[in-house]
Image (cartoon, helix red, strand yellow):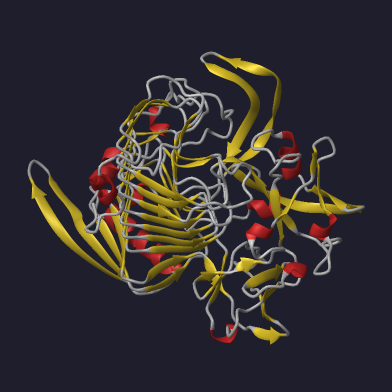
């Protein structure tokens, strides 16, 4: 690690000596080298700040800039890189091929029969679990009962009173396998616009059916919450697949982790040898945390030319996963009887409180935190999350690919203690994410574990700009903007969704759109986007319930202008006042189609 600095003298009434731009070169390609560099920059500037240094926002914003330049290589982290207000005005720049990884390489493979087997090492001195595995940069399949999702079995009946799902007996015991007595198996259940991950507790065969029960807490939440609901006694009963059992390891490209024996099994693809392969499993949930407080904010952080890879999210392994929408999981939920009156809104039939998945990079109370020419890839949670209290900044010219959950998340999706249908109007406006930019980015193969996730999930935000992005091959919605399911006045306003190209969306879920909105958003404009090429899985709950544009409950004061779609297949569900629809559909000028999506020269 080398530190190169320049000094400036300012002579006036007082003599001030401080560091000008500080450059730190890091060639030690591991996470500790980056941590050392961040601390070196922090301490160098602290020593050259006029004494006594009183920590205050103005002092932080006035401190000199510093740049950390990283040599090409994989920087493996044993803990998240934490950037604090004292690290403001810092740029971290990688050479081509710079990777921040939360993964562990698996080596020492031996062939045993049809599979290759390796010991799983400890992480930080302890055994660990994981839900993803990558072989030579390709995401492998966690062992499951079907190779083709079109062949998923369907549930037969839901017994809410006894918290039981009834399924065909052949789905859990047949000539290929039996899950009876297997530990740690999971059911992934399709529910309209979400999937639930349910850890199987017991299976009981009764004739040609099987009663499946699940562990708590997800069992309680799953059978008490009304929306989204599994479908039964219908033309399209909810499909499901089973995963995470050694007896399901029967197709090339699949893997299974025996957590008791600390062994990893992989069924290779034809002509694939793990002796010469690079195999990664994720150990960290979050790689980078940028964290300030409402009063002492972190500002002016820049990340450039870095790939953030190999993160995990383990809550489903310990508590299951029962989402409400866009991957936001329910911590408590139940049906209301009688329904609750809400002034100006339709009556409410349910209550819900939410949590959100970990992301590879998380920002809290940060101003002007920017990512440019970065990759968010091979991730087990979400990609990038501006959690709360973030102003300005954003991402440009980045790629979000192979992500288990949401690609980019911004703003609150109701605080954990606020019932999610109540209007969010924080008395301290600094809680709200605002004036951020998501521009010229690629989102593809996002939500590949949690099919109810989206490419860009923006909740309670204002003045966000989502412009000239390309979104394709996603399981549900492309861009989701807003939250709350009510038309009350909240903190959303002035958002802009412009000239995005969205195609091959809704790969697994319906009740969807290329662009979807919720809530009252005065001054918001959605313009000159191109939405086309809906996917058509046969197992969705309603094959006609998909849309190009979709204003859902409470959507108010939003203008839709000059959006090109192959037809005017739009849904306006329980909207509030003030929405304007101006010249949307196949008649929109050809130049809109040609200009949408990423710009060749960036923005």
Q: Is residue 155 left or right of residue 520?
A: right
Q: Is residue 440 left or right of residue 291?
A: left
Q: Looking at the image, which residue sits at the far left? A: 12
Camera-nearest residue between 141 and 23: 141
Provide residue 17's location: percent of width, then percent of height: 17, 52
Q: Quadrant of the N terminus?
A: bottom left
**Is residue 71 visible in the rendered structure shown here?**
yes
The residue drawn where x is 41% and y is 48% is 532
The residue drawn where x is 69% and y is 34% is 225
Camera-nearest residue between 595 and 340: 595
**Is residue 51 visible in the rendered structure shown here?**
no
Q: On screen, 259 above or below 209? A: below
Q: On screen, 473 above or below 586? A: below
The residue drawn where x is 8% and y is 41% is 13
Provide residue 585's location: percent of width, then percent of height: 35, 38
Q: Looking at the image, which residue sits at the far right? A: 207
Provide residue 478's location: percent of width, then percent of height: 45, 46
Provide residue 187's location: percent of width, then percent of height: 72, 54
The residue drawn where x is 53% and y is 33% is 415
Q: On screen, 463 above or below 453? A: above
Which quadrant of the view contains residue 521? top left
């Amino acid at each position: 690690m080398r530190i190169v600095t320049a000094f400036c003298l300012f002579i006036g009434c007082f003599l001030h000596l401080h560091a000008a731009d500080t450059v730190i070169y890091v060639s030690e390609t591991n996470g500790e080298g980056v941590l050392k560099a961040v601390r070196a920059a922090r301490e160098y500037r602290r020593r050259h700040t006029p004494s006594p240094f009183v920590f205050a926002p103005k002092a932080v914003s006035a401190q000199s800039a510093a740049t950390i330049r990283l040599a090409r290589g994989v920087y493996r982290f044993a803990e998240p890189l934490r950037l604090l207000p004292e690290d403001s005005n810092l740029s971290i720049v990688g050479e081509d091929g710079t990777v921040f990884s939360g993964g562990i390489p698996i080596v020492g493979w031996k062939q045993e029969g049809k599979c290759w087997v390796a010991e799983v090492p400890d992480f930080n001195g302890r055994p660990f679990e994981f839900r993803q595995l990558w072989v030579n940069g390709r995401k492998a399949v966690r062992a499951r009962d079907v190779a083709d999702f079109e062949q998923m079995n369907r549930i037969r009946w839901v017994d809410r009173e006894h918290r039981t799902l009834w399924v065909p007996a052949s789905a859990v015991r047949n000539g290929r396998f039996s899950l009876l007595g297997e530990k740690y198996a999971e059911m992934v259940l399709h529910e309209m616009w979400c999937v639930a991950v349910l850890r199987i507790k017991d299976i009981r065969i009764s004739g040609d059916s099987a009663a499946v029960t699940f562990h708590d807490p997800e069992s309680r939440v799953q059978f008490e919450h009304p929306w989204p609901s599994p479908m039964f006694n219908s033309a399209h009963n909810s499909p499901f697949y089973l995963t995470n059992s050694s007896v399901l390891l029967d197709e090339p490209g699949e893997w299974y982790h025996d957590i008791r024996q600390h062994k990893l099994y992989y069924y290779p693809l034809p002509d694939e040898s793990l002796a010469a392969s690079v195999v990664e499993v994720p150990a960290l949930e979050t790689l980078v945390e940028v964290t300030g407080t409402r009063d002492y904010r972190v500002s002016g952080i820049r990340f450039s030319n870095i790939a953030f890879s190999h993160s995990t999210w383990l809550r489903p392994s310990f508590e299951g996963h029962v989402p409400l929408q866009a991957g936001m999981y329910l911590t408590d939920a139940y049906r209301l009887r009688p329904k609750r009156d809400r002034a100006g809104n339709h009556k409410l039939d349910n209550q819900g409180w939410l949590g959100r998945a970990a992301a590879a990079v998380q920002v809290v109370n940060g101003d002007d935190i920017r990512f440019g020419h970065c990759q968010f890839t091979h991730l087990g949670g979400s990609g990038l999350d501006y959690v709360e209290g973030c102003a300005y900044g954003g991402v440009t010219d980045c790629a979000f690919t192979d992500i288990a959950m949401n690609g980019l998340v911004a703003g609150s999706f109701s605080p954990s203690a606020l019932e999610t249908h109540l209007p969010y109007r924080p008395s301290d406006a600094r809680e709200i994410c605002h004036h951020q930019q998501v521009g010229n980015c690629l989102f593809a193969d996002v939500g590949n574990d949690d099919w109810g996730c989206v490419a860009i999930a923006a909740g309670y935000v204002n003045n966000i700009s989502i412009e000239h992005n390309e979104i394709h091959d996603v399981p549900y919605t492309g861009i989701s903007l807003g939250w709350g399911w009510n038309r009350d006045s909240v903190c959303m306003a002035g958002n802009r969704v412009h000239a995005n190209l969205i195609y091959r969306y809704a790969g697994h879920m319906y009740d969807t759109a290329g662009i979807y909105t919720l809530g009252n958003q005065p001054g918001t404009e959605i313009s000159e986007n191109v939405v086309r090429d809906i996917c058509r899985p046969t197992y969705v709950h309603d094959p006609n319930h998909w849309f190009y544009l979709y204003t859902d409950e409470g959507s108010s004061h939003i203008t839709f202008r000059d959006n090109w779609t192959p037809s005017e297949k739009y849904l306006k569900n329980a909207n509030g006042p003030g929405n304007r629809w101006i010249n949307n559909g196949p008649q929109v000028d050809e130049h809109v189609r040609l200009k949408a999506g990423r710009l060749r020269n960036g923005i």
